Image (spheres, helix red, strand yellow):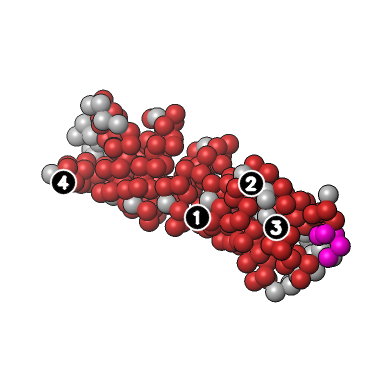
Amino acid sequence: MRRNYYNYILALSILGISLTGLPSVSFAEPNSKQISSTKEAKLLKTYTSIIENHLNKNLSIMRTVRILVNNYPEHASYIVSAAFDLTPNKKKAIIMAAIQAEPAVTYTVVETALTYFPGRAEMIVQTAIETEPAYIDDILSLAIAHSPGKADSLITVTLQNHPSYSESIMRTAHESSSSNLLSSVIGTLKLIPESADYVLNGIKDFFTSLGGTESEAYISKEQWKLLAVEAKNSGLDKDRLQWLVDKGHLEQKELAAVYNK
């Protein structure tokens, strides 16, 4: 019954008939781009009206978005856009509801949210990954592409909240933004030393998989030393960092010096 109602409203919108029942009037033959733009505007207006109606009936924005995305996942961008316009202070709830309703729209929801709230990229990434961690690579790479200046903080917040995904996070970060890659790891170890075991395993697996390529050349010896220092401060034994010597990132005496202090 509910879906039939929404189908009726959407059909009216797409056909050019307003919610009041009055047909739209066109005096010129529109081109394909105009048709597409007009259809998008009508869909956004329609979902805005539907959401307003639900809110006026005291339905929560989360429930409303979940119902709509569940019924019309192909319109996820219009649904969350209308929800953001009407209740921007509920952005986190909207993101969660849309992704929970249909995980396959995660990319669309995150992209729309980043467009609406570019200054809240860290929150958007954290919320999306917490809701659907299976899309962690897509979420992080999309956020870095939208906000390259926030790459370090985006990588850090992702590592902090999901240290068990460290290797995947590092791979995505390396592909999206290779500058200052280790700084995010070092920052994570400082803030959450208990994550060191997960994070260092992920870092080791990632850099080992590179096979000593020139991709590692941008990382300075000082950064490798800082990584060793924070690993030590986090409680890891020196043996756990022997791979830094084996890979040529540090000399044996440099690693020993870190642990002798």
Which of the two marks, 3 or 2, is nearer to us in this view?
Answer: 3
Question: What's the residue at 56%, 49% (across, down)?
Answer: 158
Q: Along the horizontal axis of the image, is 91 left or right of 160?
A: left
Compared to residue 124, the image places residue 226 above or below, namely: below
Residue where numbered disc 4 is placed: 4
Give the spatial CA distance, label 3 vs label 4: 63 Å
For the residue marked with disc 2, what is the amino acid? Pro
- Amino acid type for the residue under numbered disc 1: Ile
Nearest the eye: 108 or 204: 204
Sequence-wise, the earlier of marks 2 and 4 is 4
Q: Which is more N-terminal, label 2 or label 1?
A: 1
Q: Can you identify the residue that label 2 sits on?
A: 193
Q: What's the residue type where badge 4 is placed? A: Asn
Give the CA distance from mark 3 to mark 1: 30 Å
Q: Given the image, on which type of amino acid does mark 3 rest?
A: Asp
Residue range corresponding to the magenta coloring: 252-256
Helix, strand or loop for disc 3: loop
Figure check: 204 above or below 211: above
Q: Residues within 10 Å of mark 4 (few under 14, many from 20)?
A: few
Helix, strand or loop at mark 1: helix
In the picture of the structure, the residue carrying the numbered disc 3 is 237
Label 1, residues with CA under 10 Å away: few <14, some 14-19, many ≥20: many
Secondary element under disc 2, as helix, strand or loop, is helix
Q: Earlier in the sequence, mark 3 or mark 2?
A: 2
Q: Earlier in the sequence, mark 3 or mark 4?
A: 4
Residue 136 is labelled as 1
Circle 4/circle 1 CB separation < 8 Å: no
